[in-house]
Image (tube, rainbow, N blue to C red):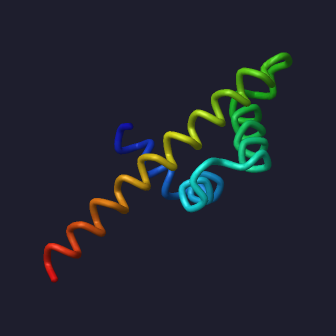
Amino acid sequence: MNQVKVNEAQSSPSLRNAAAMGAPSHAEIAVRAYQLWLEQGRPPGSADRNWLEAEHELRVAAKSLSLIANVHERAGSVQN
């Protein structure tokens, strides 16, 4: 994941929630899929693609933020 995606994950409430809870909820995926649809200009017939993309983004963000938290946690335990 590039730095832009990490920053986006940290700033987006739905992505932050997914990271905090582990796997994204149905509602979080729905919100992100809707955001994607709006960003794309509301194209017809894109619901399945947007759903899969939203689910993927949220899972990747959750995993990335979990890894970052683990690194920070380990760094803190090394400093103590």
- Depth check: give the residue in front, 22 or 13: 22
Q: Say above or below: 22 vs 20.
A: above
Residue 54, above or below 20: above
Q: From the viewer's side, name the closer residue of 3 and 42.
A: 3
Q: How many numbered circles are shown?
A: 0
Q: Position of residue 62 (x, y in %)?
A: 51, 49
Percent of width and height locating residue 49 = 71, 21
List the single residue furthest toward the right.
44
Residue 40 or 72: which is nearer the viewer? 72
Q: Quadrant of residue 50?
A: top right
Q: Looking at the picture, does residue 54 appear above or below residue 78?
A: above
Left or right of 73 on screen, residue 17 = right
Q: Give 40 or 62, whichever is nearer the viewer.
A: 62
The structure residue drawn at horizontal position 79% and vertical position 49%, both measured from the top left corner, is 27
In the picture, measured across the screen, residue 69 lies left or right of residue 56, that is: left
Q: Who's the residue at 43% across and 55% down the image?
A: 66
49 w.r.t. 66: above or below: above
